Image (tube, coloured by chain):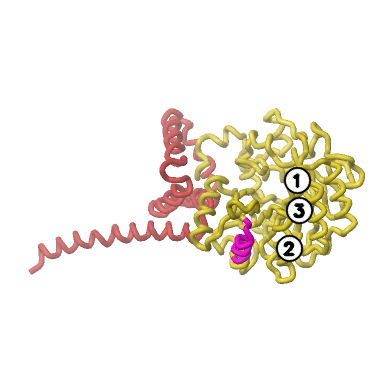
Amino acid sequence: MSSYYNPDDLPRFPEIGKDAPELAGKFFEYYGAVMAEGELSAREKSLIALAVAHAVQCPYCIDAYAKECLEQGSNTAEMTEAVHVAAAIRGGASLVHGVQMRNVAERLSL
Amino acid sequence: MNGYDCAGDELNNGVSPNVRAGFGQSLVRHGLRLERDPTHTLQINTGLLCNQACKHCHLEAGPARTEIMGRATMDQVADYAARGGFQTADVTGGAPEMVPGIDHLLTRLVGAVPRVMFRSNLTAIRDTAREHLGQLCRELKVVLVASLPATHASQTDAQRGGGVMDTSVGTLQWLNSLGYGQAGTGLELHLVSNPAGAFLPPGQDRAEERYRRDLQRKWGIVFNQLYTFANVPLGRFKTWLDSSGNYDPYMDRLAKAFNPAAVAGVMCRTMVSVDWNGELHDCDFHLAKGIPLSGVRWHVTELQGPPATGKSIPVADHCYACTAGAGFT
């Protein structure tokens, strides 16, 4: 194995159903329903998925949803803003824990 | 179709990245044949001269091209349009605005068929010397079909050249001021969007909603309908696909998105295309590839009417671009 991540593995995702077809079937059905047009458009959902892909740092998801965003009619300015949303939430999540840090420090400090 | 294409598309379509069926094979696998329905549209390619050199152009049109339709051929084409009983004449290029005598062709066509469409790249028509063409189109009630790949300059300029977005916006505003795209004028202004790269276009209805909202909000522009089409892997676009390593992935993408239901509505069933020499083809993409009408070289003067209903249409792998997703109608 030359790398833990191989682009050729992405289209093999359905193989995850080989030893647990029922569970995979349920997952993929759910997945398809989630990503379909609903109260949010498929384009909006693909931008959310792209942001989440960056938050969870999944190369497969980034590959898949960068393409999907383009095919849904988004442009790279919108996609970049979506990634900044992920970065802001991730950064904010770190920073807001600073309040906890300050609580501890204040409790221990003179 | 969502990001991972995970819901069994691989199994349903039988397409894997390394085993792509030819288009003809895909038709056979689905029990389909590509044959003519009654032909109602005559598409007229007036030549390859263009002021732009768009990266997705299947014809490799550009400023250095010299192939253009002459006046004698224009008359032969207009005569064919009339005697063939066509409902629509669809004038394209290149940039047909740049072809000497284009006013003559449009005027003749308006007298020959009920509906005349004129495809504009939104930059050639705004040259000072050609603004009269917009006025002529208005007088003749010619339908304008204009290319605008995106509502954002980065994608539009990447596909069509630097500054094209700004010029296109100005032209659309000018056309709106002439009455084009405005309710109640009878002057139709339609937009066409091709993706700015090796990916499929968004769904037409959703994209149209977005275009309508964006163009109105940003620039006060109105239009009638938006058409979204996949890029066809020929000409300059194919050269780019090859040089960027995108050819096989793009062809796989098109093949994977093959929609058997779209075959019934592809434009070649109801349209015939004539090139600047007066020779006939089943569509503008076969024209680009040099595939003659029904596989036989015909000149426009040799036919009395449209190709017969039921006649077989030659296929090639670039046909996948017309059957991907909702299709190319």
Q: In which quarter of the image is residue A54?
A: bottom left
Disc number placed over residue B91 in the picture, else none: 3
Q: Which chain carries label 3?
A: B
What percent of the width, then of the height, locates residue B61? 75, 60
Mark sitting earlier along the chain (2/1): 1
Kind of residue sitting beneath label 3: Val
Front label number (1 vs 3): 1
Q: Which chain carries label 2?
A: B
What percent of the width, then of the height, locates residue A100? 19, 59
**Do the dots labelled 2 and 1 sit on one chain?**
yes
Is residue B198 visible in this depiction of the protein?
no
Q: Give the range drawn in magenta.
A: B170-180
What percent of the width, then of the height, locates residue B189? 64, 54
From mark 2 to mark 1, how far is it between C-alphas?
19 Å
From mark 2 to mark 3, how far is it between C-alphas?
13 Å
- Chain A shown in which color? red
Mark sitting earlier along the chain (1/3): 3
Quadrant location of the C terminus of chain B in the rendered image:
top right
Magenta stretch encompasses residue B268 = no
Helix, strand, or loop for circle 2? helix
Looking at the colours in the rendered structure, which chain would you say is drawn in yellow? B
The residue located at (66%, 56%) in the rendering is B146
User: Does B128 sit left or right of B207 as displayed?
Assistant: right
- Report the residue marked by disc 2: B133
Front label number (2 vs 3): 2
Disc number placed over residue B114 in the picture, else none: 1
From mark 1 to mark 3, how far is it between C-alphas?
14 Å
